[in-house]
Image: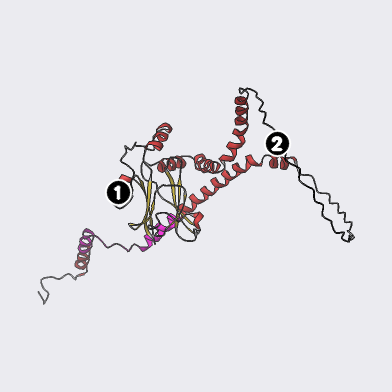
Amino acid sequence: MEKWALNHPELGLIELEVGYDSEFLALDPAWPEQPEDDEEITPVTAESGLKERFSALFTNPPVRARILLNGKVLHRLRTISSARYLLKDSVEEDKLTAENAGLDRAKPHLKVTSNLFNDVLEVEFRQGSDIVLFDPPAGSRGEKRRDAMESSTLKRVGFPILAGLGKGGWAIAVIILAPLVSRFVKWLLSFLPDFDITLPSLPSLPAFPQIELPTPSLPQIQLPTPNINIDINLPELPAWVELLLDYSKIWVPILIGIVVGLLALRNYKKSEETKRAWQEKQRAKVPVTTRTAAEQERGADEDERDCRAEEPETDGNSPHS
């Protein structure tokens, strides 16, 4: 089972658990209520190849998910998908309140990013303008992605841009693949023989009697129309603007990808700043530690020596001796 966790200074421990039916039944015998039949689970790791991951996608049972707050189960998901999830108890609904269901972004919620293979890549805690990234669990696909992004500035920018291009990738795919598919279809049709289909003629319908009704003659009213001729000479568009307008289906998805990449960079910086603020706040709440027993004993010896040094020296002729 894969567990994503974040310690919030006010809300407490927030967890996202991702696994299979057998793993969740070991934790909660009441869910899933109708688990899938016992099937052999093909183990998939972050180092697995594309072929192994595709095979596991069709052979493994579906991936479930739960969201917990301080150990209490808030949400249970039959499948994992990219969406925003409100930190609100909705176990009875058996689903999460997603963004398209009217989620209030000012309230604390999670934003989960997953891929085609049901791998959780990133989990964000959001509340208004606050954004904090979860630390991915060890050995997960999310950890491999984070390590790759932290190893290179190019990857830190490039991965989110590629994710943004994926959002508009269907447009690029249609533009690139449509001519190829059209040529392929024409090539297949060229092998079909030419044939002419002659449909039988339908019998003529009998003639119906023509009825002519009188039409009233209404007076014609002609209103004067003003002759307004406004000639505005607009400047011609530059050639590069006309080029952008002609190829908007290409550059718009690319622009979306760049914007998504820049927003991901901004969110990463905001997350690091928020985490540092949380750490400083927690350090400020830690009380001053007391001295250890060894330090107390050493301090007592020093105090005793100081007291002896301050006592006046006496000789044998003293009246008090």
The part of the chain drawn in magenta is: 274-301
Q: Which residue is mark 2?
A: 203
Of tags 1 and 2, the one toward the viewer is: 2
Is 292 displayed left or right of 107 in the figure? left
Quarter of the image for residue 192 reads top right
- Is residue 129 in sight in this rendering? no
Q: Compared with residue 149, is residue 289 higher up or lower down, i.e. above or below?
A: below
The N terminus is located in which quarter? top left
Report whether 102 appears left or right of 89.
right
Give the spatial CA distance, label 1 vs label 2. Answer: 72 Å
Residue 71 lies, in percent from the top left, at 32, 57
Q: Does the stretch in magenta take in 296?
A: yes
Q: Label 2: how many residues lie within 10 Å, few (<14), some (14-19) or many (20+)?
A: few
Q: Quadrant of the C terminus?
A: bottom left
What secondary structure predominates along the stretch shown in magenta?
helix
Estimate the x, y position of residue 48 in percent, counting from the top left: 39, 34
**Residue at x-position 63% and y-position 22%:** 193
Nearer to me, 51 or 32: 32
Q: Amino acid at mark 1?
A: Leu
Q: Nearer the viewer, residue 80 or 50?
A: 80
On the image, numbered disc 1 is attached to which residue?
25
208 vs 131, left or right, is right
Q: Amino acid at mark 2?
A: Pro
